[in-house]
């Protein structure tokens, strides 16, 4: 099961867990209230399992590719990791299926608090368009993920402040309706 928690506010290494003391866990339901969707799939047998194909068909995810975060496999490694960790939003969903390794997606909830979501092999996570978020590797320094998209991918991050972006207004209105 995916694990998520409210973050402490220390400036220490982003790759540490940043749990509060005592920890303040966040449930899947809380994540769903922020518009974040999650499934656990079989990363070694996802083709046979069929769940990914089902989700792709339902949600129209026609595009896939694979990203591996290591200095050897990811061009401009340092620069990319830095930009992943800048708080930003996108005009579309961010969809990642973790094939190997682990890391943290941080999202802002409706009170603008950081929630850290730990992802590992088999996790499929969908961040809604317009949510402020960022990504970091953990202390194991390795993740391999499938990226999915509806049609031609647009990876452009809009760094905060991006409150005038149409996806932001759309996101805020959906979240308000759902509360
Ligand atoms: C992103 O956009 O933040 C990434 O693709 C991070 C690596 S995949 C878990
Ligand atoms: Ni992003």
Image (cartoon, rainbow, N blue to C red):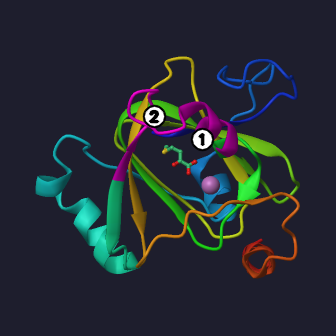
Q: Are marks 2 and 1 in contact (CB under 8 Å)?
A: yes
Query: Is the CB–ligand 1 distance for label 2 below 8 Å?
Result: yes
Q: Does 79 appear in magenta? A: yes
Picture layout, residue 126 above or below residue 114: below
- Crowd tier of the residue under label 2, counting other residues whose Cα lies within 10 Å: few below 14, some 14–19, many 20 or above: some
Which residue matches tag 2? 69
Which element type, helix, strand or loop, lies under badge 1? Answer: helix
In the image shown, does 67 or 74 lie closer to the viewer?
A: 74
Q: Position of residue 28 (x, y in %)?
A: 58, 50
Q: Position of residue 37 (x, y in %)?
A: 52, 60
Q: Which mark is residue 29?
A: none
In the image shown, does 126 or 37 lie closer to the viewer?
A: 126
In the image shown, does 49 or 158 lie closer to the viewer?
A: 158
Residue 53 relative to residue 80: left or right:
left
Which residue matches tag 1? 80
Q: Residue at x 78, y 73 (%)?
A: 168
Residue 39 relative to residue 13: left or right:
left
Which residue reaches farthest front? Answer: 76
Residue 121 relative to residue 109: left or right:
left
Q: Does 75 appear in magenta? A: yes
Image quadrant for the N terminus? top left
Which element type, helix, strand or loop, lies under badge 2? Answer: loop
Q: Position of residue 145 (x, y in %)?
A: 39, 45
Which one is earlier in the sequence, the residue at label 2 or at label 1? 2
Q: Which residues are magenta?
A: 66-83
Q: Residue at x 85, y 23 (%)?
A: 11
Picture layout, residue 31 above or below residue 145: below
Numbered marks: total: 2
Q: Position of residue 45 (x, y in %)?
A: 16, 46
Residue 51 visible in the shown view: yes
């Amino acid at each position: 099961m995916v694990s998520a928690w409210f973050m402490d506010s220390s400036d220490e290494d982003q790759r540490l867990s940043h749990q509060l003391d005592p920890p303040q866990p966040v449930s899947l339901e809380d994540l769903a209230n922020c518009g974040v969707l999650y499934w656990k799939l079989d990363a070694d047998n996802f083709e046979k399992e069929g769940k990914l194909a089902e989700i792709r068909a339902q949600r129209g995810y026609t595009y896939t590719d694979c990203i591996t975060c290591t200095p050897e496999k990811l061009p401009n490694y340092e620069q990319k990791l830095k930009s992943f960790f800048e708080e930003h939003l996108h005009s579309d969903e961010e969809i990642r299926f973790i094939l190997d390794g682990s890391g943290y997606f941080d999202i802002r909830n409706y009170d603008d608090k950081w929630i850290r979501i730990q992802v590992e092999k088999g996790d499929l996570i969908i961040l809604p368009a317009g949510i402020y978020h960022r990504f970091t590797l953990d202390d194991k320094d390795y993740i391999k993920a499938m990226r999915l998209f509806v049609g031609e991918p647009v990876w452009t991050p809009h760094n905060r402040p991006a409150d005038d972006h149409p996806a932001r207004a759309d996101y805020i209105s959906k979240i308000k309706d759902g509360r």
